[in-house]
Image (cartoon, rainbow, N blue to C red):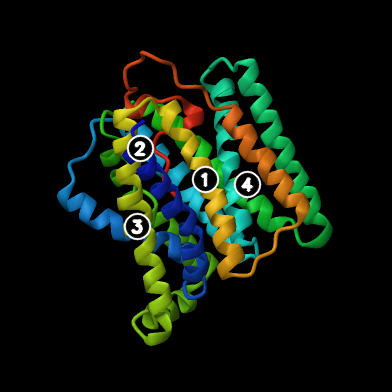
Amino acid sequence: MTFKDRMLAVVVAVLWGANFLAIHYGLDHFPPLLLGSLRFLVLAIPTVVFVRRPNVRWRWLVGYGVGFGTVQFAFLFLSMSAGLPTGLASLVLQASAPFTAVLAALLLRERMGRRQAIGISAAVAGLVAIAVARSAVAPILPLMLCLLGALGWAFGNLCSRKAETDDPLRFMLWMSVVPPVPLFLLSWFVEGPRAIGEALATAVTPAGIPGLAALGYLVVCATIIGQGMWTALLGRYPAGMVAPYSLLVPVVGIGLAFVLLAERPSWIELVAGVVIVGGVLLGTPRARKAVPPLDPGAAAVLEEPTRAAP
């Protein structure tokens, strides 16, 4: 990779790491399921009007929208609303990588090499250590909700792989058409029409400006800009060369939460975080020399080619 493209990859990681901070502030105003619905609704409307649908089967497009969009963000937002620290959420969501590899082996019959198996085992051990440490000092439910979100992301990755799209960004944009309705219906029945009405009515008041700004960041910076640059990098280089930069996301997320939210992770969580990131990195296939750039829509499952920040 050129120096310029390495810097672009770092910028994407910073945008996605700060994404968790935006979620934190967005949840101060919007109920979690409503926030998820609005995030995708803002993308879905212009997508349907101006963007041509990608040439993929509906089953994979809808599956990606349900797994990556609906399930992941429903449980991620619920976990943070229930008290999971912002920085820790950015780390735990990395469980999507080992989940993806395991599901690919079980459902797609993909072979798992020894190096990949060791990396996945290390990442899982780190997650177990965090779960044990959290259960001793705080309710474990928020952590479990975040892990369910990571599992939804993993199922979405399998659908993305099966879609084999030649235009990942267009595929990503059309995925946003799927989540708004189910998330809004869940919000209606779980959070209630009164909470929805109050959040929408006060969104244009001074008190609602931080929430609107957070929503804008989720849509513009994390998705359109971040995903656009990431897709461009995947189009120029093998996915195995680009994917490891996504491991900077929890580093940025934890760092920003430490500085701006005064979150202080325990030493067990920090050590386990290093183990998780190292395990995911070890389990990511190495880029080979003299190999033409991979089709971004057919990259290795573990590398999560259509990765977008929550």
Residue depicted at 65% across the width and 61% down the height:
84
Cα distance in 3D space between marks 2 and 1: 17 Å
Q: Earlier in the sequence, mark 2 or mark 1?
A: 2
Residue 306, how many percent across, how many down? 39, 37
Residue farthest right in this picture:
136
Residue position marked by numbered label 2 in the rendering = 3
Cα distance in 3D space between marks 3 and 4: 25 Å
Q: Secondary structure at mark 4?
A: helix
Residue 22, how many percent across, how many down? 46, 64
Q: Earlier in the sequence, mark 4 or mark 1?
A: 4
Residue 203, how many percent across, how many down? 38, 79
| Relative vertical location of residue 237 with respect to residue 170 in this rendering, above or below | above
Residue depicted at 52% across the width and 74% down the height:
28
Q: Secondary structure at mark 2?
A: helix
Residue position marked by numbered label 3 in the rendering = 221
In the rendered structure, which amino acid carries the disc numbered 4?
Leu
Decide which of 225, 194 is in the foreground and name it: 225
Q: Which mark is residue 62?
A: none
Residue position marked by numbered label 4 in the rendering = 147
